[in-house]
Amino acid sequence: MDRLRNAIRTRHYSRSTERSYTSWVRRFILFHGKRHPAEMGAEEVAAFLSHLAVRGNVAARTQNQALHAILFLYGSVLAIELPRIRGIAPAKTTRRLPVVLTRDEVATVLGEMTGVPRLMATLLYGSGLRVMECCRLRVKDIDFAASTIIVRAGKGQKDRVALLPVAARADLERQLHNARTLFDADLRNGAGWVELPFALGRKLPSAGRAWAWQWVFPATRCYTDPESGERRRHHLHESVLQRTMTEAVRRARVAKPATCHTFRHSFATHLLEDGYDIRTVQELLGHKDVSTTMIYTHVLNRGPGGVRSPADRLPLPR
């Protein structure tokens, strides 16, 4: 498992990918009675995947995720090439339409939220951010003059420029003021350090206590880093926003399975409804391929210029 983690970190995969891969490998090993993966092969992999599909009734994406984790283990850690046999082929996935809130539903859900979670949710909808992209915003990434937000190391470790909505500007300025007050208090108490990406801490030793590198949404408590001994403050955990979102949707009585990511779907959908071209939406979302953004074109069948049902042309009954 240590070799697996090292191989993942060497390739600079995200932490969520590391947690996912290690979890699937652990489940694979336990399924076969804690046998070492080097002693197993394609048949054991196929049996595990079949168990997930038949007994576990998992979705195709989940099954493929488990397959990719196990193939990574054999190919990148154990240097064992598994033969392509029946049962190891990726499961066929079905692209489904995303859950999208109407503008009124977005306003109602946001109205049920307060404080920092409401500001973060406003950025999810107004900027099209993912949850972790919002949580990991740093002070230097906010550009009020250009009305932009720089998303660093997003999905696929890609940077992009996102919108800074005018509706969030005043609250964001207030949040930065509160974060600065908290940061100054941490400095007086011997803390004020923040986690830095890669080896930046060695290149710029003072950057860990610089205001520009602090989190926009800091956590409420400090912690001591076991390696450096520095008293740091992490960013607000994503579960805080996720729980608040779930409760807000319940109170708003929205009959849709809306999550934080639903705001991102709604952002893209509403931009297309307003007439923005799909390439612009692709850039704002950070999609590598425009075909990914095409999922939101279902909105083009609605509205005054959309397809009209033949039932609407029937004469009214007398």
Image: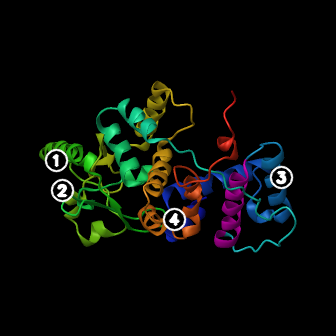
Q: What residue is rendered at 43% in x and 41% in y?
A: 103
* First along the sequence among labels 1 and 4: 4
Question: What amino acid is found at the position of numbered circle 1 in the picture?
Answer: Arg
* Mark nearer the viewer, 1 or 4: 1
Neighbours of disc 1 within 10 Å: few (<14), some (14-19), many (20+) = some
Q: What element carries label 1?
A: helix
Between 279 and 1, the one nearer to me in the picture: 279
* First along the sequence among labels 3 and 2: 3
* First along the sequence among labels 2 and 1: 1
Between 226 and 110, the one nearer to me in the picture: 110
Question: What amino acid is found at the position of numbered circle 2 in the picture?
Answer: Trp
Real-space Cα distance between discs 2 and 4? 27 Å
Real-space Cα distance between discs 4 and 3? 27 Å
Real-space Cα distance between discs 3 and 2? 52 Å
Task: Please give the count of numbered marks on the rendered protein.
Answer: 4
Question: What amino acid is found at the position of numbered circle 4 in the picture?
Answer: Tyr
C-beta proximity under 8 Å, tags 2 and 1: yes
Real-space Cα distance between discs 2 and 1? 8 Å
Between 301 and 293, the one nearer to me in the picture: 301
Residue for badge 3 = 50
- When asked about the image quadrant of residue 8, the answer is bottom right
Neighbours of disc 3 within 10 Å: few (<14), some (14-19), many (20+) = some
Residue for badge 2 = 211
Residue for badge 1 = 180
The x and y percentages for residue 62 are 69, 52
Left or right, 147 with respect to 288, comes to left
Q: What residue is rendered at 68% in x and 63% in y?
A: 68
